[in-house]
Amino acid sequence: MSDRLDLPPSKLVAIVDAQLELARLGPAFGAVMDLAASKAMRLTGADGAVIELVDGSEVVYRAAHGLAEAQLGLRMQIKGSLSGLVLTSRQAATCTDSEIDDRVNREACRRVGLRSMAILPLLFGDQAGGVLKLVWREPRPFDEDEVPIGQAIADMTAALMFHASQEGAQVLQRKVTQDPATGLPNRSSFYEQLRVRVDDAIARSGHVGVMVVRVRPQHRDVMVEISRRLGKECREGDVLARLGVDEFGVILSVAARRTIVQSQVLRFKHAAGAEPVLLPDGAKIDTLLRFGGALYPEDGKAISELLAVAREQDSVVERRQ
């Protein structure tokens, strides 16, 4: 706490503002972690930020921004990592240069493109349930309050999640991987499952199809209804998730060819846009739906590339009252 009291007033105000924004999100833990990583990156000047949560002997990247965004959904072994040291000690750690620090996985750092990092524990009572990791592309000293600022954001994030951690690992797992409004898997869960599908496709020289649906307006009842319509069209093995406030994603279980992906996108499009959305008060609301699909590996080998192509290949369904 004394470190934080030594911060300049402007930084203290910025931290308090960030903590208030996090508190307003309440139990929407996916959104909480996403905002926390984003705020921590901005307030510290980091090139990227990740929130990793413990899952057995691994940590899972549940939120990621900037340089680390491509790692969302990634699983890493705790043993032999600097994150593991922070989880065990419950104390923050810094790495000024990954090329000369024997505590880090040097090859993993090179793949991400980072050279320095600060790792802050997420303390759930007397144990660390995860970490907030801030990363930079270049070696650097940590002399600009990066650690106390990052820890303040980490502490608020952990405080919001603490009650769920007391209810058990399964309750916390559900809340950090599920969208509270629709009950669907959230963005990090989608990325995690898509990574598994892509890894399997690599092993058997197969394919993975994805679809992205963007919705206007971003009305809660509209999103719930569109999620219901999309869910009815899902086949066994499909994974439907909410990727953002206005976006859904589907991992398609059948995707041997581009024409198959296109036909499935067309099927979802017709089903979701066939009728106007009826609100609980009886009013009808205009909707604008955009659909797009992509096929691995033809349209991209990285998950970010695949989803970017799906967003570009969109077609529009407009429903008016």
Image (cartoon, rainbow, N blue to C red):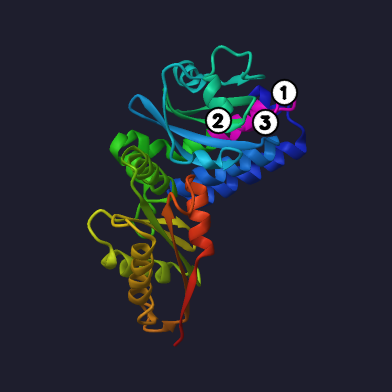
Q: Is residue 98 left or right of residue 286?
A: right
Which class describes the residues within 10 Å of circle 3: few (<14), some (14-19), or many (20+)? some
Q: Mark 3 against mark 2, which lies toward the viewer?
A: 2
Which class describes the residues within 10 Å of circle 2: few (<14), some (14-19), or many (20+)? few
Q: Is residue 225 visible?
A: no
Position of residue 308 measured from the top left corner of the image (x, y, whole percent): 53, 55
Tell me, for residue 137, which label it has, or none.
Answer: 3
The amino acid type of the residue labelled 1 equals: Arg
The amino acid type of the residue labelled 3 equals: Arg
User: How many angstroms separate mark 3 from mark 2 (CA)?
Assistant: 12 Å
| Membership of 176 in magenta stretch | no
Query: How many callouts does the rendering have?
Result: 3
| Membership of 138 in magenta stretch | yes
**Of label 2 and label 1, which has the lower sequence position?**
2
Q: Residue furthest left?
A: 236
Q: Mark 3 against mark 1, which lies toward the viewer?
A: 3
Residue, disc 1 = 140
Tell me, for residue 111, which label it has, or none.
Answer: 2
Residue at image position (39%, 61%) is: 258
Q: Quadrant of residue 146?
A: top right
Position of residue 244 measured from the top left corner of the image (x, y, whole percent): 48, 57
Q: Secondary structure at mark 3?
A: loop
Magenta residues (range) = 135-154
Residue at image position (41%, 84%) is: 283
The amino acid type of the residue labelled 2 equals: Arg
User: Does 152 appear above or below 215?
Assistant: above
Residue at image position (59%, 47%) is: 20
User: How many angstroms separate mark 3 from mark 1 (CA)?
Assistant: 9 Å
Q: Secondary structure at mark 1?
A: loop
Position of residue 279 measured from the top left corner of the image (x, y, whole percent): 38, 78
